[in-house]
Image (cartoon, grey):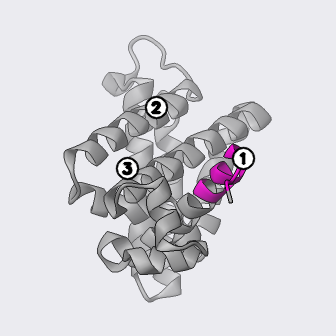
C-alpha cells in the first residue's frame, strides 16, 4: 500500500514531536531507536523511512523545538506589542519551568546534548539560535545614543536567552519548591531589566 505525501508528512511530524518529547525527558543517550519508535507509534522501518539515523532525528527535533520557541515569541510580539516581553518571561519562568519535562523548552533541555553531538547538528543549532536572537532583538526597544554600557538589542537578546535558559535549568534542578520559585522571581526581574535599553 502506497501512502500519500500528506500521510508521510503527518507521520514525520508525529515522529519529530515524539522524538522531541523523548529527547527532552531522557536526553540523547537515554532515548534509543526502539523507545523513539514506540513513543511515536511507528515501526523501525517507518522511522528509517523518515530519518537516516537517531542523530538526524535528534537534530531535527532540536531545530523544531527552537523554531517553536521563535514562532511563539513572534506571535506574542504581534499580539501584545509593548507587553510581549513581560508575557514571555512570565510564561517561560512559570509554565515552562513547571510543566512536564517532555513539554519543556528545547533550549534548557536539549542544549547540553547539542554540545556533545556532531558539527552538523551544532552548526544547524547555531543558525537557528541566531534566528531566535534576531526575533527577540527585533522586539526590544532601541537604546538611545549614549546609553550606559552601550548594549545593543542583539546583545540584550543574548543576555535574556542566557538568563532565562540558565534560570529554568537551575529552577528545575532543585528539589526545594521555594528555592525554585525564588530563582524564577530573581531571573524574571533581571530579564525584564535587561530588556530595557538603559539596562
The answer to whether residue 152 is magenta is no
| In front: label 1 or label 3 | 1
Q: Position of residue 78 (x, y in %)?
A: 74, 31
Crowd band around label 1 with a 10 angstrom C-alpha radius: few (<14), some (14–19), many (20+): few
Secondary element at image label 2:
helix
Q: In this view, does 165 lie above or below 181?
A: above
| In front: label 3 or label 2 | 2
Q: Position of residue 137 (x, y in %)?
A: 50, 28
Q: Position of residue 31 (x, y in %)?
A: 38, 76
Quick one: 126 or 139, which is closer to the camera? Answer: 126
Secondary element at image label 3:
helix
Q: Is residue 115 left or right of residue 44?
A: left
Name the residue that disc number 3 marks.
Answer: 162
Q: In which quarter of the image is the N terminus?
A: bottom right
Crowd band around label 3 with a 10 angstrom C-alpha radius: few (<14), some (14–19), many (20+): some
Q: Which residue is drawn at 44% across and 50% down?
A: 60
The residues colored magenta run: 2-12
Q: Say if residue 164 shows up in the picture.
A: no
Name the residue that disc number 1 marks.
Answer: 6
Quick one: 197 or 130, which is closer to the camera? Answer: 130
Q: Which residue is drawn at 54% across and 43% down?
A: 67
Image quadrant where residue 139 sits: top right
Secondary element at image label 1:
helix
In the image, farthest residue toward the front:
1
Name the residue that disc number 2 marks.
Answer: 131
Question: Mark 1 or mark 3: which comes first in sequence?
Answer: 1
Task: Determine the CA span between mark 1 and mark 3.
Answer: 38 Å
Image quadrant where residue 84 sits: top right
Quick one: 144 or 94, which is closer to the camera? Answer: 94
Q: In this view, does 30 lie to the left or right of 96?
A: left
Q: Are marks 2 and 1 in contact (CB under 8 Å)?
A: no
Image quadrant where residue 117 sits: bottom left
Amino acid at each position: 500500500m502506497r501512502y500519500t505525501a500528506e500521510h508521510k508528512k503527518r507521520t514525520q511530524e508525529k515522529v519529530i514531536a515524539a522524538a522531541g518529547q523523548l529527547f527532552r525527558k531522557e536526553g540523547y543517550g537515554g532515548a534509543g531507536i526502539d523507545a523513539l519508535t514506540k513513543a511515536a507509534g511507528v515501526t523501525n522501518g517507518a522511522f528509517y523511512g523518515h530519518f537516516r539515523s537517531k542523530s538526524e532525528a535528534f537534530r531535527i527535533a532540536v531545530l523544531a523545538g527552537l523554531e517553536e520557541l521563535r514562532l511563539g515569541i513572534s506571535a506574542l510580539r504581534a499580539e501584545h506589542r509593548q507587553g510581549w516581553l513581560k508575557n514571555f518571561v512570565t510564561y517561560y519562568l512559570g509554565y515552562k519551568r513547571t510543566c512536564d519535562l517532555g513539554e519543556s523548552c528545547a533550549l534548557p533541555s536539549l542544549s547540553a546534548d547539542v554540545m556533545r553531538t556532531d558539527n552538523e547538528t551544532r552548526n544547524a543549532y547555531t543558525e537557528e539560535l541566531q534566528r531566535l536572537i534576531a526575533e527577540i532583538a527585533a522586539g526590544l526597544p532601541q537604546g538611545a545614543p549614549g546609553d550606559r554600557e552601550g548594549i545593543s538589542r542583539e546583545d540584550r537578546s543574548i543576555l535574556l536567552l542566557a538568563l532565562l535558559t540558565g534560570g529554568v535549568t537551575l529552577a528545575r534542578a532543585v528539589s526545594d519548591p521555594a528555592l525554585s520559585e525564588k530563582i524564577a522571581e530573581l531571573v524574571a526581574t533581571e530579564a525584564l531589566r535587561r530588556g530595557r535599553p538603559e539596562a
